[in-house]
Image (spheres, rainbow, N blue to C red):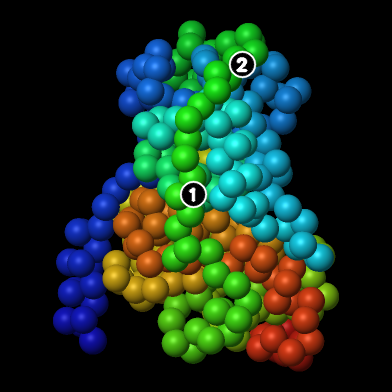
Amino acid sequence: MRSLFLLLILNLSLFANDGFISVDELKKHIDDKHYLILDISDEATYKKGHIKNAILTDIEKFREKVGSYAIMKQAQNVQKLARDLGINDNSSIVIYGHGNPKDLLKESYMALILIVNGAKDVSILNGGYLAWTFESNILSSTAISLPKDGNFTAHYNPDILVNLDYVKSKISKLPMIDARSTDIYYGTAPSVGVKRYGHIQGAMSSFWKDKFNKDEMLRSDDELKKILLVGHGIDKNDEVISYCTGGLEASMNWYILYAHFGVKNTKLYDASMREWGNKDDTPMERFKWELFSK
């Protein structure tokens, strides 16, 4: 067992380390025409101040309602919306938020949208706008940046997003990680918009927020490896399925695995528990109430 653990640690040292860009690195490219900066916050917050040249966007424009859940729109719709933001095929795209509720998750879901549809150079600003203003306030702005037409061509990757039937077929065959908080995972609290309590059978709890410090800076690679990789026994070549309530929380676990650590066979169940937990015949588990009443 000890030798297997040491081998896993050795393999982790080979994992890629990217996906997040630092404030210092972005400052070097702030006026680079190939860089396109996306602000995923709301309009009022954006108008109070944002990174110079940043374009405001709304991830909900990229999603469509299907019954009780929302999922990513099809590639042709994503292509049009991306072009409207000024995204080109050779754009280096940096995504950030302002620390508002769900901003971190909007960042990772926006990155998911772009990567699924073929964008090659996507990163999230580590620490977001709070880190930016702390380190380089002089490069902030209140001027509204209007995008030019882009030429982005969507190339949909069918190997990232998975549906209910696919998840069913993989139960007990590969790691599945639940990005919701532990009380929701264990079924001691409800998940908003979900009828049934608990989690997908065999899934492991991996609360997305545990990957960040209180200042919303990403934890160190050593901490992340212990939490997300060693903790769940995930190897670089493993197939992993990430899910949550409705796609957003799962997108952060997916992004850290896929883009930061290079686990390229990480998949995301977009409809997540808004679909799975509202059906009566999907395999679920939940701690029994008597365990918590003693």
**Against 43, is 31 above or below?**
above
**Does 210 sit left or right of 185 as displayed?**
left
- Quadrant in which residue 248 is drawn: bottom right
Looking at the rendered structure, the secondary structure element under dot 2 is loop
Badge 2 crowding class, 10 Å Cα cut-off, few under 14, some 14 to 19, many 20 or more, is few
Answer above or below: position of 207 versus 91: below
Report the front residue among 173 and 253.
173
| Residue topped by disc 1 | 117
Is residue 293 visible from the viewing direction of this image? no
Query: Reading the chain from its start, which is encountered first: label 1 or label 2?
Result: 1
| Image x and y of residue 28, in percent | 33, 18
Q: Which secondary structure, mark 1? A: loop
Query: Based on the displayed image, in which of its 4 quarters is residue 144 positioned?
Result: top right
| Quadrant that contains the N terminus | bottom left
Q: Residue at x 56, y 41 (%)?
A: 79
Q: Is residue 212 left or right of residue 277?
A: left
Give the residue type at disc 1: Asn
Could you tell me which residue is drawn at 72 percent across and 30 percent down?
42
Q: Amino acid at mark 2?
A: Leu
Whether residues under marks 1 and 2 lie with C-beta atoms below 8 angstroms apart, the answer is: no
Q: Nearer the viewer, residue 273 or 192?
A: 273
Q: Residue at x 17, y 81 (%)?
A: 3
Q: Position of residue 163 (x, y in %)?
A: 60, 72
According to the image, label 2 marks what residue?
A: 146
In the image, residue 127 above or below residue 11: above
